[in-house]
Image: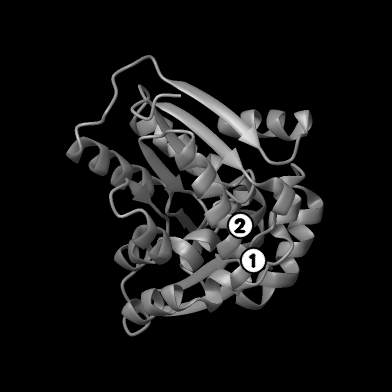
Amino acid sequence: MNKEDYIAVFDSGVGGISVLRHLRSLMPGERYLYFGDSANAPYGTKTREQVRDLTFAAVENLFARGIKALVIACNTATSVAIGELREAYPDRILVGIEPALKLAADHFPGGRIGVMATPITLREEKFECLMRRYDTSCRVYKLPAPGLVELIEAGRGNSPEAEKLLHSLLDPYAGKLDAVVLGCTHYPFATRAISRVVGEQVLLLDGGEGTARETRRRLEEAGLLSRGPGEIRIENSRADDALLQLSRDLLES
């Protein structure tokens, strides 16, 4: 691989495919290498140290293979490790993701906003800082969703099982929300189930489009945008043909 060719996209599993869809839509001429670490998913219920070590191991491997940019398409990995990663790779194009709370606050000034995310993302100081910027102008609810990532990894993000889990998590907020921020890149693959539970009138927002725009900005600034035919390679730490097929299906969903 030529480092001038590929943008690597890293996630704890298949969730970052939701970000890859935005990247492809915005920059169809680029070549993408997607790496999901499903063998170690979910990251959101692990310790901070475990997430940090897994993220660094994946990032080091991807940079060693020769890439021009890296997108951390995982809110948990970003919240835990992005600061250290930028210190370790100050000269590389490295883009993270964060919950789209600003976008929700702009849509609903003074509104009621739920942030669905993994438990560790909601505990991290990075999210606390983000929340403090908006909880004076909006009412922000933390909505941890343990168990949802595992269902999405199994291709059951919009199943009756997922809906039952979401009812147990979100029913206390029925009628209380204007928007739900999907603060995990897996969650866009459960939007139908989430909407059925919180109501079709509740706006669902995620940070994937903003991450794609920032990636394009950084590449353009560095003179590294491609105008080729485009290509997508999908790899996963779990050697499972069904999982790779699920990744391809989610990309086209």
Q: Which residue does the image show at 31% across and 81% down from the upper left? A: 137
CA neighbours of label 1 inside 10 A, class few (<14), some (14 to 19), many (20+): few
- Residue nearer the viewer, 32 or 90: 90
Residue 176 visible somewhere in the drawing: no
CA neighbours of label 2 inside 10 A, class few (<14), some (14 to 19), many (20+): some
Residue 196's place in the image compared with 237, above or below, is below
Residue furthest toward the right? 161
* Three-letter code, disc 1: Gln
Residue indicated by mark 2: 54
* Percent of width and height locating residue 120: 59, 72
Residue indicated by mark 1: 50
Q: Quadrant of residue 174?
A: bottom right
Q: Which residue does the image show at 75% across and 70% down from the upper left? A: 168
Q: Which residue does the image show at 41% across and 34% down from the upper left? A: 67
Residue 203 visible somewhere in the drawing: yes
User: In which quadrant of the rendered image does the C terminus lie?
Assistant: top right
SS label for mark 1: helix
Are dots 1 and 2 in contact, CB under 8 Å?
yes
Asked if residue 56 lies left or right of residue 194, the reply is left
- Residue nearer the viewer, 73 or 183: 73
* Three-letter code, disc 2: Leu
Residue furthest toward the top? 229
Q: Quadrant of residue 233?
A: top right
SS label for mark 2: helix
**Mark 1–mark 2 distance (CA, rounded to whole Å):** 6 Å
- Residue nearer the viewer, 108 or 144: 144
Q: Which residue does the image show at 74% across and 57% down from the upper left? A: 163
